[in-house]
Amino acid sequence: MREAEKKIRDRAALAEECRRLRAEGRKIVFTNGCFDLVHAGHASTLEFARRQGDVLVVALNTDASVRRLKGPERPMVDERNRARMIAALECVDYVTWFGEDEPRALVEELQPDVLVKASDWAGYVSGRDVVEARGGRVVLAPMVDGLSTTILIAKIRGTPPPPPPVCQIERTLFR
């Protein structure tokens, strides 16, 4: 088995691993996203997240979840290959998936000490209440201007980039 593939775990196995790591006194950091076409903005966010603790867990939206959130033409890369790419990054310790539109249930299962999201999610961080109730913290990672999967796809297609998206969850919660 390749090194990167050893990092990819199902939810139940990863929850058990997180319990073991916490018992050792290790600080677990959690972040999530689609990570459809991995680019330098993703790498920057993941490296930032890794510096917030001892172990970095990255949760990927499943293909079905990405389609619900981003539309029928996404993801560009299937969930297995997205997991393999993220797991290959040195700063990432574990990778898993979640099929819900937001990762709150997975955050409850894993009980991370730190939850990291890119700063464009400042208005709503799923699982914030779970992490903060345990005395953990939420940290917003700085964005890299001009780097997003949506902009990259538009560039590949030769179309103008769409306006910045409003998260569907924010749209629902903050009407």
Image (spheres, rainbow, N blue to C red):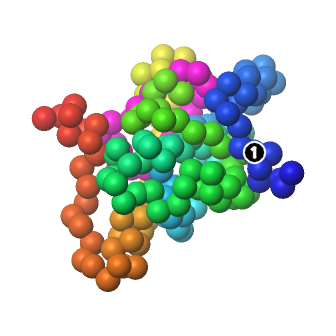
Residue 168 falls within the magenta-colored stretch: no
Residue at the spot of label 1: 7
* Front residue of this view, candidates 90 and 9: 9
Give coordinates of residue 73: x percent, y percent: 36, 60
Q: Which quadrant of the rendered structure holds the C terminus? A: top left
Q: In this view, does 43 lie above or below 101?
A: below
Q: Residue furthest bottom?
A: 158
Label 1 CA crowd tier, 10 Å (few <14, some 14–19, many 20+): some
Q: Which residue lies furthest to the top in this view?
A: 133
* Front residue of this view, candidates 169 and 115: 169
Q: Is residue 125 above or below residue 95?
A: above
The magenta segment = 108-127
Name the residue rendered at 21%, 64% in the picture. Answer: 163
Give coordinates of residue 159: x percent, y percent: 27, 79
Q: Is residue 20 left or right of residue 68?
A: right
Residue 110 falls within the magenta-colored stretch: yes
